[in-house]
Image: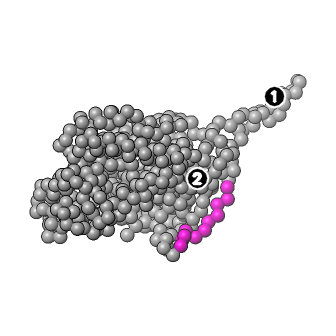
Amino acid sequence: MTTSFEGDRRGRRLRRRVTRTGPVAALCLAGALTLGAAPASPAAPADPLARYHHQHLTWKSCLLGPDDETGKELEQAGARCADVTVPLDYTRPGGRTITVAVSRIRATDSAHRVGALLLNSGGPGGQTIGDPPWVRKAMKDVGERYDVVGVDPRFVGRSSVLDCQWPTGSMIRGAGKDRAGFDRMVSFSADLARRCRAHAGDLVPYASTRNSARDMDVVRAALGERRISYLGYSYGSYLGEVYTTMFPGRTDRVVLDGVIDPARYGPRLLRGTEAAGKHALRDWADWAAAHDQDYGLGRTGSAVLATVERIQSAAEHAPLRVGGYRVDDQIVPTLVFNGLSQDNSLAFGDFAQGVRDLRLAAEGHPVSPSPWLAESLRFLLTGHDSTYGSAQTAVLCGDEAAPRDPETYWRDLRQAGTDDRLFAPVTNDINACAFWDAPRERPTRIRADLPALLVNATGDPRTVYPGAQAVHRAWPSSRLITLHDADQHAVFGVFGSACVDDAVNAYLATGRLPATDTSCPRG
């Protein structure tokens, strides 16, 4: 896909338990020419971002208050936090500024220090500032040689916030069963775009991956690093592709996990993930059938899938009552989509509990939703996570234009047919980018080669495996680590594969890529 949307957010929580690079400076001469004298040599261009590159960072406690669990984890890991000032508009570096929040766990092996490892955990819109503790743990002894740095991109998390005051945390929905449902999505999407113009119109034009990459380079300079290493998950892989293109020579070791094919990136990057989503659903259904005594969804995988289909049929007939929420046929497919990104028993169990609750609601029983379902419904049906959806959408729409005619999406939905009522209605549906202003910049044309380490699971339902293969072909100097037989989105330090983790850590330790691509079994 691309973005991993709510699946990325839950994945993060599970882990815790050549284009223009900027404004061109005018060339000034060192002095005036005088008659008979040799012309003076031209001075080096002034750095228009000098005050940002050389700013002093004030490192402080990461704890924001007694209920700040992220801050507590950072404190326990010895991290400190700072705010990095960056220009809102890089074509006007002397104008308005915003801040980008960072956290850092310093290297303890100073004699063998490699440098700073910057992180991005996906989204777009995902918070990364809390990730250094678990990444540092996943790195084992290698982590002692790095400053591990989490960066909340512009408008995300603890950075300057972009909030369109949405009644939802996501622009993503299913299209519904008929034209009336699709027309509701058209109105819903147009309203989201209108709210962004009304409530964040001064910030939205400056949300883009290219500006996040520019911010990352300011962070690099403010940290005093000539080059940085980088670990990016999911959308973070695309940010890494853009950064290494815009700022060649400023990276050392680059790991991209859950790899996005830049040729498929854009507001409709979910298209093409349907087969992987269905595969993940079947695998989960087999697991749920093996645990029928716990969840009662069916004794075979086919029976479990039939239960899910009956839930959707009931929601098409009338919205389901789940606690205080009304769950209709546009929300059920979104819940299914969001429930499938982590291939482990904990995530499977959470999703199975949610499906059990939806089945009870479909049968007319009163339901108090389980924790996963309650959180997912709050995310989709309230404004609690408005900032997440606002930032995510602003970046996607700001990176590349989407088709503006609703009939384009309706044709795609019709061509997808009616056999798939759970994935195609989500991946082909219209979204707010259809009503967005045109991007300020053209998409980045990604560099031709990079000696990076790529990681992907064959069954990843978000950043599908063919995308990683496409990037690997485009970058002959790269190496690809493949985790086989896992429907897993984001692998290193997450899935628990010693094969993957050891290969990544060997590269981070030595800077040498594996001699050949690496295949890792699920077990």
Taking the image as shown, residue 282 lies to the left or right of residue 328, namely left
The residue under the point 61% across, 43% down is: 90
The residue under the point 43% across, 39% down is: 435
Q: Position of residue 505 (x, y in %)?
A: 41, 59
Taking the image as shown, residue 310 lies to the left or right of residue 435, namely left
| Quadrant that contains the C terminus | bottom left
Q: Nearer the viewer, residue 224 or 14?
A: 14
- Residue 220's tag is 2
CA gap, disc 2 to disc 1?
Answer: 37 Å
> Label 1: few (<14), some or many (≥20) within 10 Å?
few
The residue under the point 39% across, 49% down is: 171
Q: Which region shows up in magenta? A: 55-65
Seen in the picture, residue 119 relative to 140 is either above or below; the reply is above
* Magenta region includes residue 298: no
Q: Nearer the viewer, residue 67 or 521?
A: 67
Q: Nearer the viewer, residue 143 or 195?
A: 195
Task: Please state which amino acid type lies under the numbered disc 2.
Answer: Arg
Seen in the picture, residue 182 relative to 218 is either above or below; the reply is above
Badge 2 marks a residue whose secondary structure is helix
The residue under the point 39% across, 37% down is: 263
> Label 2: few (<14), some or many (≥20) within 10 Å?
many
Q: Nearer the viewer, residue 308 or 494?
A: 308
Q: Position of residue 407 (x, y in %)?
A: 32, 33
Task: Please state which amino acid type lies under the numbered disc 1.
Answer: Pro
Mark closest to the chain's N terminus, 2 or 1: 1
Q: Decide if residue 306 is in sight here.
A: yes
Q: Decide if residue 249 is in sight here.
A: no
Q: Position of residue 226 (x, y in %)?
A: 60, 51
- Residue 163's tag is none
What residue would you read off at disc 1? 39
Main secondary structure found in the magenta portion: loop
Q: Nearer the viewer, mark 2 or mark 1?
A: 2
